[in-house]
Amino acid sequence: MFKEGKDMNKNRKNLTVDLINENSEKTQVNIYVIRPTNNSIQSADRYRAKIWNQCVLDGVLTKKELSNFLKERNIWTEEKESSEREIINELKNLEQELYLGLGHDGKRLKISEGQRIAIEMRLLRLKLRDLIADKISFEENTAEALADNAKFDYFVADCTYYENGEKVYKDVEDYNSKSSDEIAFAAANALAQMMYQLDSRFEENLPENKWLKKFNLVNDDLSLINKNGDLVDIEGRRINENGNYINEENQLIDRNGNLINEDGTYVLQANYYEPDELSEKIEEKIKSRRKVKG
């Protein structure tokens, strides 16, 4: 765990990192990261070029080579590429419709109609992520991606200091050997925030989520809620924290409102009965007559 200090300098972030030693004792270390200087950027660019060249010599595909490879293997087709463009364009059109508040007929939208558009945008983003997931996973291992990662590692190694001004890492190799510890994680996270202006509230700042939040249609976790603050699904039906349907008494139900148990089985509600002796005799006579007639 780590927390940022209150330093307001945009070129520096102070951090306090919690560490657990071999005896399970908690200690704290104060460090800070700085924005890369021109000298650091130039050195990092040379290091990136070195790693890129090494990747190519080792047979790692470049992005251009990967694109051809994915098409040859029918992993990323022209059809998928066209679908990606269509979804992106549809998201732009829906965002415009949502924020201008006008339907296709030019009339003002109701809040319920805006909610429908926002939910549609959410579903489209999920569809887009599923569509490009394979492509992204391949691109993460191209020569360019590996070289960019190496460049960032160089920055973390060169821009991380203890509070007394001493460097935490001797060089990028030293950082790489310790990149899984808490200090490295905190430093990398803080530097990424500083350099790339990464927003830790990315999901919250998506257009559809900002709109839903403005009209109190989602909670702090961005889960859909009704006017009473109850969790609901995309069709407005009440659900619990686990996504199971519930009724007004917070009892588990199926989609049709039938009571179910926690294990998903139905709650017994039918009133079965045992026929009395007279009823059984009557039933037997009826069966006998049917046999005779048959």
Image (tube, rainbow, N blue to C red):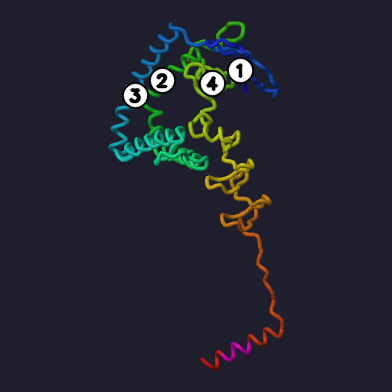
Indicate which disc, 1 or 2, sits on the residue closer to the N terminus.
1
Rendering coords of residue 1 (x, y %): 62, 23
Q: Which callout, 1 or 4, points to the residue nearer the camera?
A: 1
Mark 4 lies on a secondary structure that is: helix
Q: Marks 1/4: CA distance?
A: 11 Å
Q: Marks 1/2: CA distance?
A: 26 Å
| Marker disc for residue 214 | none
Residues marked 3 and 2 touching at CB (< 8 Å): no
Q: Marks 3/1: CA distance?
A: 40 Å
Residue for badge 3:
58
Q: Nearer the viewer, residue 170 or 289?
A: 289
Where 260 sits versus 103, above or below?
A: below
Mark 1 lies on a secondary structure that is: strand
**Residue type (three-letter) at the residue carrying disc 1:** Glu
Indicate which disc, 4 or 3, sits on the residue closer to the N terminus.
3
Residue for badge 1:
4
Indicate which disc, 1 or 4, sits on the residue closer to the N terminus.
1
Rendering coords of residue 207 (x, y %): 48, 31
Residues marked 3 and 1 touching at CB (< 8 Å): no
How many neighbours does mark 3 have within 10 angstroms: few (below 14), some (14-19), or many (20 or more)?
few
Q: Which callout, 4 or 3, points to the residue nearer the camera?
A: 4
Residues marked 4 and 3 touching at CB (< 8 Å): no
**Residue type (three-letter) at the residue carrying disc 3:** Asp
Indicate which disc, 3 or 1, sits on the residue closer to the N terminus.
1
